[in-house]
Image (cartoon, grey):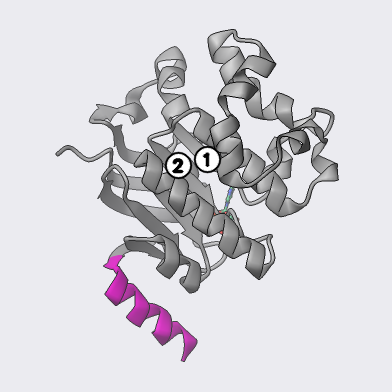
């Protein structure tokens, strides 16, 4: 079986030194790899580089064995719906003047030229899966809690049936009980859709719950650990 994502010797510098170098790994459909490291270790930068939202300083990214790091313009745009990013502050990527239903249905309305209500009707199983009421989608972002907004974002992202999701600290702004609900929802959706994901967090507990393997970023170096080795590493950090 070919991996969904293959990363070869990725390197990123911002000019004032290497953020990371020599990052290589593969990711299969349905698998979750964590990116762990201290604040400023380069997790978000690496996440954005994987999706080509940021220019690479070196190395290659293959998605379904297509070298996407060589693609530009329309050929890259054609692949983008299959690779989505979930952010720590979802409200930043939402237009405060748009009702959620407009933001959530926008990609499919745009790609398919369908009516908004028709798309929303089609998304009802997802709306139900994330545990929101349909009427909540007629609210503006400032009328919902952080957890509700993150759930609504899941509807938007999963509506595109992505094969790969990079989730950058998606629950770090939520309180513990809501965090657990959103993580379990993400796991469910991932299992049902066989989505691969790269999960960024500085919380070892979140890594243990979500990941099959973890890549640790430290001083520019990337080390891939299985979950037993990661548990030992995280316990070591606590002492
Ligand atoms: N656009 C940029 N230009 C210059 N330097 C940048 C840029 N983006 C990030 N950096 C620097 O790169 C380093 C890695 O940042 P990054 O946000 O990837 O780390 P992180 O591990 O995700 O941190 P955190 O957990 O605090 O979000 C930091 O030193 C940051 O200041």
Q: CA distance from mark 2 to mark 1?
A: 6 Å
The residue depicted at 59 percent of the width and 45 percent of the height is 130
Magenta-tinted stretch: 225-239
Q: Say which label, 2 or 1, has the lower sequence index.
A: 1
- The residue positioned farthest toward the top in the image shown: 113
User: Which numbered tag is attached to residue 165?
Assistant: 2
Above or below, comparing residue 11 to residue 182 in the picture: above
Judged left or right of residue 126, residue 144 is right
Residue 218: horizontal and vertical position, in percent?
42, 67
Residue 117: horizontal and vertical position, in percent?
68, 17
Above or below, comparing residue 43 to residue 116 in the picture: below
Residue 108: horizontal and vertical position, in percent?
57, 19
Give yes or no for contact between labels 2 and 1 (Cβ–Cβ under 8 Å).
Answer: yes
Above or below, comparing residue 160 to residue 72 in the picture: below
Q: SS for tag 1?
A: strand
Residue 234 lies in the magenta-colored region: yes
Residue 231 lies in the magenta-colored region: yes
Residue named by callout 1: 85
Which one is in front, 146 or 24? 146
């Amino acid at each position: 079986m070919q991996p969904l994502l293959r990363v070869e010797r990725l390197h990123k510098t911002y000019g004032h030194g290497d953020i990371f170098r020599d990052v290589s790994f593969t990711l299969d459909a349905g698998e979750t790899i964590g990116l762990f490291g201290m604040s400023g270790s380069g997790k978000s930068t690496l996440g954005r580089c994987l999706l080509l939202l940021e220019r690479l300083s070196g190395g290659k990214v293959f998605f379904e064995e297509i070298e996407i790091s060589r693609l530009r313009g329309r050929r890259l745009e054609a692949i983008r719906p299959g690779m989505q990013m979930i952010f720590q502050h979802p409200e930043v990527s939402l237009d405060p003047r748009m009702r959620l239903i407009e933001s959530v249905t926008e990609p499919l309305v745009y790609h398919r030229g369908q009516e908004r209500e028709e798309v929303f009707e089609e998304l009802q199983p997802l709306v139900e899966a994330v545990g929101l009421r349909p009427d909540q989608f007629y609210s503006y972002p400032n009328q919902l809690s952080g957890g509700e907004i993150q759930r609504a974002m899941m509807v938007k992202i999963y509506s595109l049936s992505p094969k790969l999701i990079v989730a950058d600290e998606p629950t770090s702004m939520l309180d513990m009980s809501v965090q657990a609900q959103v993580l379990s929802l993400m796991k469910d959706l991932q299992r049902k859709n066989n989505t691969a994901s790269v999960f960024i967090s500085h919380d070892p507990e979140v890594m243990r719950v979500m990941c099959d393997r973890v890549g640790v970023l430290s001083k520019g170096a990337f080390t891939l650990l299985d979950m037993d080795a990661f548990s030992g590493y995280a316990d070591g950090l606590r002492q």
